[in-house]
Amino acid sequence: MVTGGAGFIGCRLVARLLAAGKSVHVVDDLSLGRRENLQEHLNNPKLKLTVMDMCRPEFIDLMVQDKPGQVFHLAANSDIQKGTTDRNTDLNNTFLTTFQVMEGMKRAGVRDVVFASTSAIYGEADGQLKEDHGPLKPISLYGAGKLAAEAYVSAYVHLFNMRAWIFRFPNVVGPNLTHGAIYDFVRRLHKDKTRLTVLGNGTQLKPYIHVDDLLDAIQLGITQPANPMEVYNVAGEGATTVREMAELVKAGLGYKDAVIEYGTSDRGWPGDVPKFAYDTSKIRSLGWKPKRNSREAVEASIKAEVEKLR
């Protein structure tokens, strides 16, 4: 079962699982995910798509009926700004969806869960962040929701003889984006070819990873034992500023005379962590290495977004 399987990352994971001959049940409420992301697989008899709000009791009934061999739990609110405006968003879509997954697994007798977490759980912390960094002080409701979700995953696997693999993502880019800086910049500048307005002063510096490199890391990580839980940071090499990204979007669209207008804050919105750095030695010790560095991942994602408009 892949929750959030119609989303940006989920649809790429589903394609891999189907290619490996797995039967896949996607559960997605399509609030961020899109049915068209799965279009090429909808006639595959090994794929089942259920459109459902996972917070409803019927989801647990579905898990008990389905009894999946493994759960990839990707469903969550990934729009940090929205979570600040509507403060029930991360409670429901990030935390309670996770509770529902873990309770459904307990009732269905399912042992294995792969959980998509985030760098946002660390908050604003200095130095290279390792998996055992603490104390964890998220500054967004999204980060708080993910941290609470991790805690519930940990409690369930320790109490009920389950296993969990938790992957903490940084900014993930690639084809099929649904939101985020690249998605917004490309559409904003395409609409007004004379100027691009950027939230913040452009100095925000973060590691970006291409979705396919991320999925390579996940596929490798879950081959390792979890007794009962393992946590991995995953990130590409290097980091990219928002200013670099805006200039790359401008070049990608070919609007050389466009003016980029920056704000004055060192962050794009309340809850935005302006910069962080990951220690990824744990996942790398297994033999994983990203095929693209941060800038190359950003460039590939911009190219994919620009091609959609042509």
Image (spheres, rainbow, N blue to C red):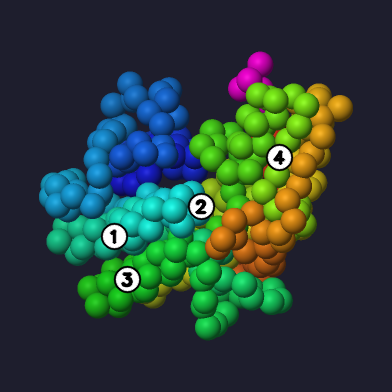
- Answer with mark 4 or mark 1, whichever residue precedes in sequence: 1
Going by the numbered disc 3, the residue's amino acid type is Tyr
Residue 201: give its label: none
Going by the numbered disc 4, the residue's amino acid type is Thr
250 on left or right of 222: right
**Residue at which label 2 appears:** 81
Residue occupying the point 70% across, 44% down: 198
Query: Marks 3 and 2, how far apart in space?
Result: 24 Å
**Residue at which label 3 appears:** 152
Secondary structure under the numbered disc 1 in the rendered image: helix
Do we see residue 85 in this rendering? yes
Task: State yes or no: discs 4 and 1 in contact (Cβ < 8 Å).
Answer: no
Bounds of the magenta segment: 305-310
**Residue at which label 1 appears:** 96
Going by the numbered disc 2, the residue's amino acid type is Gln
**Residue 53 image point, x, y percent:** 25, 44
**Residue 306 belongs to the span the image colors magenta:** yes
Query: Marks 4 and 1, how far apart in space?
Result: 35 Å
Q: Looking at the image, which residue sits at the far bottom?
A: 135
Q: What secondary structure do most residues of the magenta stretch adopt?
A: helix
Residue 197: give its label: 4
- Answer with mark 3 or mark 2, whichever residue precedes in sequence: 2
**Residue 250 belongs to the span the image colors magenta:** no
Callout 1: few (<14), some (14-19), or many (20+) C-alpha neighbours within 10 Å?
many
Which of pointers 1 and 3 indicates the residue nearer the eye? Answer: 1
Callout 2: few (<14), some (14-19), or many (20+) C-alpha neighbours within 10 Å?
some
Q: Quadrant of residue 226?
A: bottom left
